[in-house]
Amino acid sequence: MLLKDIACVLADTARSKAYIQALAQHDLRPSRCLVLSEGAGTSRQLPEEWNARKYFNLEEPLLTTLETHGIAYEVIASKDINSSEAEAAVRELPQCHLIYSGYGGAILKPHLFQLGKKWIHVHAGLLPSYRGSTTAYYSLLDNGKLGATAIFLNEQIDEGSIITAEEFPPPERGELVDYVYEPYIRSQVLVKAVQSYVQKGRFEEVPQSLQGGETYFIIHPVLKHIAILELNQHEQQE
């Protein structure tokens, strides 16, 4: 199914690969994609014993997936979503809804919210409880689970209206979190949000409660290592 009012703005990352592969698997094709890139496509190989392919194919280049499924795209010669090149390309898109999967740490500046577009982002954490950075690891340490939340972005960090959210069990290996499992769970929540849009003809959204949430900062490497070790020890015990 061609999603006439939905386009994507994608960095060449594992998350974008997971998004497009998941949407394509469910016959949900954005009508156009803008790819932020300054060079050749990225690829990453993981040890076979990690069994990463059960989630998505990290080794398949993003542009290959787009071409295989007949999704129209344009490569923007910049990795900066806030660049004049990206702004001009976004301005020309007729689609109102933009699925955004940018490079880590890239925050949309105010001028991009003045283009008449609604930016859809999937945050790797249940909102409003887990705002900010590397929230997957904080969630794992808190309760042994991960979550993802689809929202409409606004000018505040992770405070946009919620479209849908879901909680997931941890992966088999802690090393899978960054490059495989976190992108995968985000892709599943994105599919859920888009499927609801197709069924209802609109995105349903609920304003976030700004009470009771917490904003997290990049997790300390020692705490991250502890979270990974706990996952791997749990897997070995099973």
Image: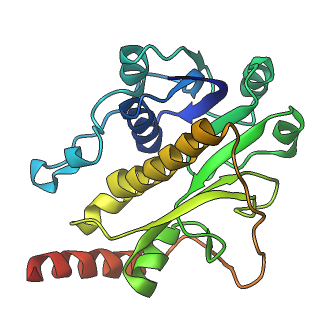
> How far across and down, in percent of the image, does residue 189 sit?
49, 53
Report the number of numbered marks. 0
Decide if residue 36 is in sight here: yes
> How far across and down, in percent of the image, does residue 159 sit?
75, 64
Q: Is residue 207 left or right of residue 13?
A: right
Note whether 177 is above or below 24 in the view shown.
Answer: below
What residue do we see at 50% from left, 74% from top?
219
What residue do we see at 57% from left, 52% from top?
122
What residue do we see at 56% from left, 50% from top?
104
Along the viewing direction, whichever of 207 and 115 lies nearer the viewer: 207
Q: Is residue 176 left or right of residue 23?
A: left
What residue do we see at 52% from left, 70% from top?
135
Q: Quadrant of residue 226?
A: bottom left
Along the viewing direction, whichever of 125 and 44 lies nearer the viewer: 125
Along the viewing direction, whichever of 75 and 154 lies nearer the viewer: 154
Q: Quadrant of residue 8?
A: top right
Decide if residue 100 is in sight here: no
Quadrant of the image for the C terminus?
Answer: bottom left
> How far across and down, in percent of the image, does residue 106 sit?
65, 47
Note whether 237 is above or below 79 in the view shown.
Answer: below
Note whether 5 is above or below 162 in the view shown.
Answer: above
> How far across and down, in percent of the image, does residue 181 sit?
35, 56
Q: Quadrant of residue 167?
A: bottom left
Indicate how the structure is coloured in the image: rainbow
